[in-house]
Image (cartoon, rainbow, N blue to C red):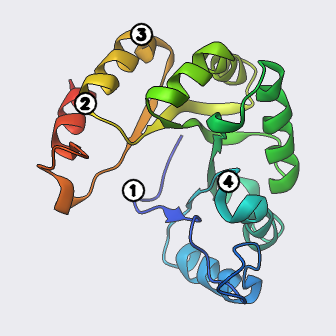
Amino acid sequence: MTYKSKFGFGCMRLPKTDENDPTKINQELFTQMVDIYMKKGFNYFDTSYAYHKGNSEIAIRKAVVERYPRESYKICDKMPTWALTSPEDNDKFVNEMLESLGIDYFDVFFIHNINVPWLKLAKKNNSFEYIKKMKDEGIAKKIGFSFHEKADLLKEVLDEYSDMLDIVQLEINYLDWDSEAIQSRKCYEVAKK
């Protein structure tokens, strides 16, 4: 898989027409932003089932999927870990996301925001095994998880699942590099190792 840049377009905080309603995305402005981003040679869009209460995926479909050839962009989406109530929910959410985005496969697919309680939900509902199956079946080209916790939990998850995963997305913030609450540096070092 080729990425034109490591500079991704995060679609968690898109422009809105009503600042009090996260579902009211300013589609025209977002589409202009996408066009500028693509014209500059970038191509990686990061979204989640949760962003803008599901409307981020629809906005990406309108601004990217319906307007650009599939091979010209990459889409990363994320399983809503906190919403899992049964193993069947994995399939339900993935099918909803594919439909909202108007695509047949994800370039990257994550289990969203692994932390102590959501790791338990992912394990209970077989989400790691599910995303491995997604990759095996071509529904996801690369798989992994996003992470916003401490380094010891990251090591635990990687020790157990790294043989089946391609990517871990970390919260790296220069202001939090040596923070004990975020542990950006420690998480980076664990992932690198």
Disc 4 versus disc 1: nearer the observer: 4
- Work out how far the residue at label 3 is from the one at label 2, CA to CA, in angstroms: 14 Å
Residue 113, can we see it? yes
Q: Amino acid at mark 1?
A: Lys
Going from N to C along the chain, the mark reached first, 3 or 2, is 2
Disc 3 versus disc 1: nearer the observer: 3
Quadrant housing the N terminus:
top right
Quadrant housing the C terminus:
top left
| Residue 156 location (% of width, % of height) | 34, 16
The disc at residue 160 is 3
Please tell me whether residue 33 is drawn above or below residue 64 in the rendered image: below
Going from N to C along the chain, the mark reached first, 1 or 2, is 1
Q: For this view, does 99 lie left or right of residue 116?
A: right
Reading the image, the residue beneath label 2 is: 151
- Work out how far the residue at label 2 is from the one at label 4, CA to CA, in angstroms: 25 Å
- Work out how far the residue at label 1 is from the one at label 2, CA to CA, in angstroms: 23 Å
The disc at residue 69 is none
Reading the image, the residue beneath label 1 is: 6
Badge 1 crowding class, 10 Å Cα cut-off, few under 14, some 14 to 19, many 20 or more, is: few
Going from N to C along the chain, the mark reached first, 3 or 1, is 1
- Work out how far the residue at label 4 is from the one at label 1, CA to CA, in angstroms: 23 Å
Q: For this view, does 193 lie left or right of residue 142?
A: left
Reading the image, the residue beneath label 4 is: 50
